[in-house]
Amino acid sequence: MISRLVDRVLGPRIPQVEAAEERGLYQRPRTLFATAAIVLGVSIMLPYWELKLKAPQFPKGLRVTAWVNRLEGDVHELEGLNHYIGIPSFEDGAVLERSVAIAGILVLAGLLLAGLHIHSRWVIVFVGPAVLFPLFFLADLQFWLWNYGHSLDPRAPLSGAVGEFTPPIFGPGRIAQFDTLAWPGFGFLLAVLAAVLTARGLIAHRRAYKPLILAAAPDKAAA
């Protein structure tokens, strides 16, 4: 039973003659999935999100760079401002996400590589998460931006003056006297590129293997 399940997941084998004649057809999804896996893996080494704040008392501005597992930049200065405004510490946010981010992205890349060997509809289970990953990242980031802006400590000296807020994920915004500007980092752009490559790989995979799946269906039914 296990072997039948494995065969069902792996899908039909490519006939040798057809593999030689239509090499590009079957190589295309493999190339796209493999490239997406590499691009996604490289994204770990680059920042995913950037935020710059400017105010009269900080004419040069403050900048925070978000990697998948840490924050860098003027974090210490912003933590000092957070204390007066009543915003929770950055250390308390996205603890789970930061702890599993690198391993999770590497798992996604590994699933993409596993998808090279899947010739059935099960391929979506292996490579689909890579398509959804950028959307998940944005949704999680938006949640934490909202959470921080709506979790002000009323005992903080300036919490009443600021009021609740939700900074935009991308583009200009304003928090009290601070003008903000947020933009995607190169790591996130690579994650988006990996998602696009994966989606194109799924289309190429369907074109290549759907005829084989349909051709094999009558034989399975007769067996």
Image (cartoon, rainbow, N blue to C red):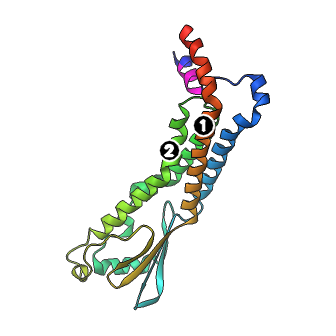
Closer to the camera, 121 or 49? 121
Q: Quadrant of the C terminus?
A: top right
Q: Which residue is mark 2?
A: 129
Q: Does the segment drawn in magenta span residue 9? A: yes
Residue 124: image x %, image y %? 52, 37
Q: Tell me the tag on residue 115.
A: 1
The reply to whether residue 108 is in sight is yes
Q: Which residues are magenta?
A: 5-10
Q: Looking at the picture, does residue 179 appear above or below residue 191? A: below
Asked whether, in this view, residue 42 is left or right of residue 149, the answer is: right
Secondary element at tag 2: helix
Residue 4: x percent and y percent? Answer: 55, 17
Return the disc, 1 or 2, that comes first in the chain's sequence: 1
Q: Which mark is residue 151?
A: none
In the rendered structure, does residue 123 fall within the stretch colored magenta? no
The percent position of residue 142, horizontal first and vertical second, equals 38, 62
Instruction: Say which residue appears at 60% left-offset and 45% top-offset.
Output: 200
Decide which of 203, 52 is in the foreground and name it. Answer: 203
Seen from this angle, which residue lies furthest top? 223
- Residue 173 pos. (x, y %): 39, 76
Secondary structure type for disc 1: helix
User: Which residue does the image show at 52% across and 63% down from the upper left?
Assistant: 48
> Which kind of residue does numbered mark 1 sit on?
Gly
